[in-house]
Image: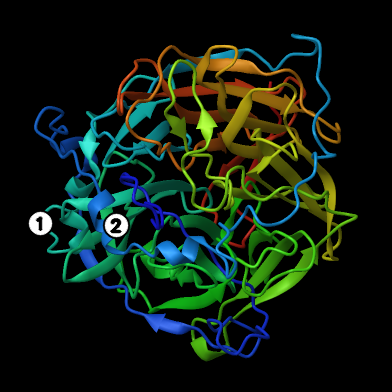
Amino acid sequence: MRPTHLSAPLAVVILLVSSAPIASANPTAPRVSDDRAAPELVMMPFRGISRPVRALPPVDVEGGPKLWLGSLENENDQRGSNLDERGIRYGTGTAKVDDRSVSPSRPTGEPMAPDLILDFDGLSSIISGPPDTEGAVGPDHYVQFVNIQFRIYDKTGAPLTAPAATNSLWAGSGSTCEGDLYADPIVMYDEPADRWVITYIALEIGSGFVACVAVSTSGDPTDEYFLYELETPLIPDYPKLGVWPDPVHNAYVMGTMPIPDPQGKHDVYALDRERLLIGAEPRPAQRFNGFPNMMMPADVDGPAPPPGSPALLYTFRDGGESFFIPPSPVDSLDVYELSIDWDSPAASRLVLAQSLTPPELAEFNWTVCGWNNPDCLSQPQTTQKLDSISWIPMQRLQYRSLGAYETLVGVWTVNAIAVGAHAAPRWFELRRYGGNSWVIAHQGTFAPNSSHRWMASVALDGSGNMAMGYNVMNAGFGIFPSLCYTVRSVDSPDFVDERTLATGTGYQTDINRWGDYASMEVDPTDDCTFWFTGEYMETTGPGTWNTRIGAFRHPDCTAPLIFFDGFESGDTEGWSVAMPE
């Protein structure tokens, strides 16, 4: 869901924004977390064990559920919070510049992103709202979620289950999670534990809001799940999850953008990973509140961080923009550290560890058309515009240890030009050597031509090569909402020419909402194969979206195979390594 301060109908999707741990100079502003603030404890009761996913009934495509949360979101309408004290929409009141980090245009096909290893159709629309496309890959499976349904495939693309309604996993639990109002799915593969983790938000009018969390009882995602219900004080919109398998700061970390009125009030929750994995009643979740923008938690791929490493999160602020509480005088990319004490929660802290600012950080234009303004990107053959989602981080923040250094990679959408609208992914790779400060190793805005590119997701393989997948659209050249991907070699300054994963042949009518995220993941069996999923338009209609799943590999990847054999989080003694053939 998304925070709605608009009268336009919005679909089954909610977004969130967080604030930094720095005290605000404005005494009337919302409280922000600082290094003296202990977390609030939030109950997270165990709700039992699900039926096996392979035994769940198929989703009823004709009869539903086909749910629309626009009316609920509009009940929380806060029109004034779209505007600053001058009556100007946030994200439009500061000076824009032509982005100096834009990629140079390239001759088509030289060089070119690698061919697909395989690609296949994912889930398609059974609701008229956006899908929030999400996927995760494990040793033998690919799991895809969209709003209100999910499906599991083997790694040839063959479906192992029928599409199932997400809430059917909770059937009989007595939880809000089995109700009919739910959205914003996330699925992660927890490599060290060989488990699958699912989250989504659920709402029950008059009874409250929860974030639903399910953890598989084995490495087989088609089997049973332990079920939990995080009882949140506000709608935990746009929840994003990171797996942080540290022996001390052991947690699933979740950032959210609470509704209503998220300005300066973004949340972070630390969930008890140790007990969630074994189906035990967890210790209370720890909630940190009051951050200036959506906080994206780091999710670990490959080897675990050095033992004792606090969990990591990031967000960004636009220089001079009054939306952010606290504000920043210059553009800022902010890295946070979350130190978790499960025995003495009052000692836990979430603090701003480092702000990366110009000239090290290339300046960026925050929002394409203004904060929370979904009437933004032009489609061919219609006046109906689409949402750019250009005010918050995109899924996900990947953490990877590459031996000589640690990395964090992420992406969000910016406006590449000073005048007009040109959506483009702003990507970054941070590095940390020897536990010192983070530095920006590489960054850029991928806009090789006039097409809009947005809804991106990035990841590094085990050799440090990056892949990025995203939507592409160009009204002037008749390019309907499509899916593309590109790659860059380790230490290369820019990406190669893109390839198409799915070609759009229609446009979206009647609604402006587009899905809130896509998903780029790396196969844990070889640490080389990228798996990407996103949405595109095959047929013109009000919500006739399709999804596609594709896998490809950077030709320079030489990462070893890593087998997690009896491996416990933070313990490297269980690893065995073999070089790929």
Q: On the picture, is 532 further left or further right than 466?
A: left
The disc labelled 1 sits on which kind of residue? Answer: Gly
Q: Nearer the viewer, mark 2 or mark 1?
A: 2
Residue 155 visible, this angle: yes
Disc assigned to residue 74: 2
The amino acid marked with disc number 2 is Asn
Which residue extends farthest right? 359
Color theme of the render: rainbow
Nearer-the-camera pick, 556 or 14: 14
Residue 248: x %, y % from top left: 59, 74
User: Where does label 1 land, which residue?
Assistant: 172
Q: Earlier in the sequence, mark 2 or mark 1?
A: 2
* Local SS, label 1: loop
Residue located at (36% from left, 27% from top): 153
- Residue 64 is left or right of residue 346, and the answer is left
Tag 1: Cα neighbours inside 10 Å, few (<14), some, or many (≥20)?
Answer: few
Quarter occupied by residue 52 = top left
**Picture coordinates of residue 460, whole percent (x, y):** 69, 38
Q: Quadrant of the C terminus?
A: top right
**Badge 2 local density, few (<14 within 10 Å), some, or many (20+)?**
some
Residue at the image position 71 percent from the left and 47 percent from the top: 365
Q: CA distance from mark 2 to mark 1?
A: 30 Å
**Element type at marker 2?**
helix
Mark carried by residue 10: none
